[in-house]
Amino acid sequence: MEGSRKIKIIVSFVLVFILVTVGIVFSIINNNKAKKEKNDVVMGQSDISGVPYITSIPPLVGYIGTEYVYDIKYSDSDSQASSITATLENAPVWLNIEGFHIYGTPPVGSNGQQKFDVKISDGANSSVQENYILVQDNQDVEEE
């Protein structure tokens, strides 16, 4: 009877040990999952490295009667160059885009701040760069 009691105690101890170990492992796994979900909510998405974004900055000043030129440089880690497109949004009528080349000549009367947005997309993800140009009189043209 004494041996039977020792066996019951050992078996009970082993079962409790197994249950505690399983509980700890489950808690660790569940906690890691909760942290990941919390980060997803904060960031909006878990992996933003695949979103194309513009890395260049346009010239800040444009001159009336002189061509304004901005060549877009971008980064996208998960798309081929052939799938990337750039478009102008909210741009002055004199500003045009061809591929990744923005150009135009500010006309007389367009002095002041002009806003334009450049949207870059890989077909699945996109980002927008908001830009401002200060259009000024061209001193070279006035002196001639």
Image (cartoon, rainbow, N blue to C red):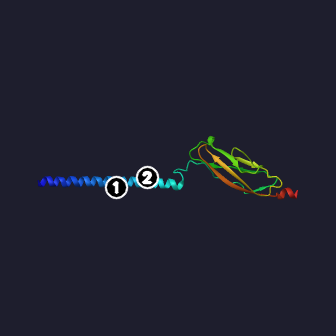
Residue 106: image location, x then y, percent? 79, 52
Using the image, tell me which numbered label, if any, was put on residue 61: none
Task: Give me the residue at 42% from left, 54% from top.
Answer: 32
Q: Quadrant of residue 140?
A: bottom right
Q: Residue furthest left?
A: 1
Q: Earlier in the sequence, mark 1 or mark 2?
A: 1
Q: Residue 19 vs residue 64: left or right?
A: left
Kind of residue indicated by mark 1: Ile
Instruction: Identify which residue, 81 or 1, lies in the foreground.
Output: 1
Q: Is label 1 in a helix, a strand or a loop?
A: helix
Q: In the image, what residue occupies the spot 30% across and 55% down?
A: 20
Relative placement, left or right, of 77 versus 132 is left
Tell me the number on the disc at residue 24.
1
Q: Residues within 10 Å of mark 1 (few under 14, many from 20)?
A: few
* Mark 2 surroundings within 10 Å by alpha-carbon count, few (fewer than 14), some (14 through 19), many (20 or more): few
Residue 110 percent across, percent down from the top left: 80, 55
* Quadrant assignment for the C terminus: bottom right
Residue 116 in picture, x, y percent from top left: 71, 52
Q: Residue 104 in the image: x percent, y percent?
A: 77, 49
Instruction: Name which residue lies at 85% across and 56% down.
Output: 141
Query: Which residue is tagged 2?
Result: 33
Mark-to-mark CA distance, 1 and 2 = 14 Å
Amino acid carrying label 2: it is Lys
Quarter-of-image position of residue 85: top right
Q: At 24% across and 53% down in the image, what residue appears?
A: 14
Note whether residue 69 is visible: yes
Indicate the secondary structure of the residue bearing disc 2.
helix
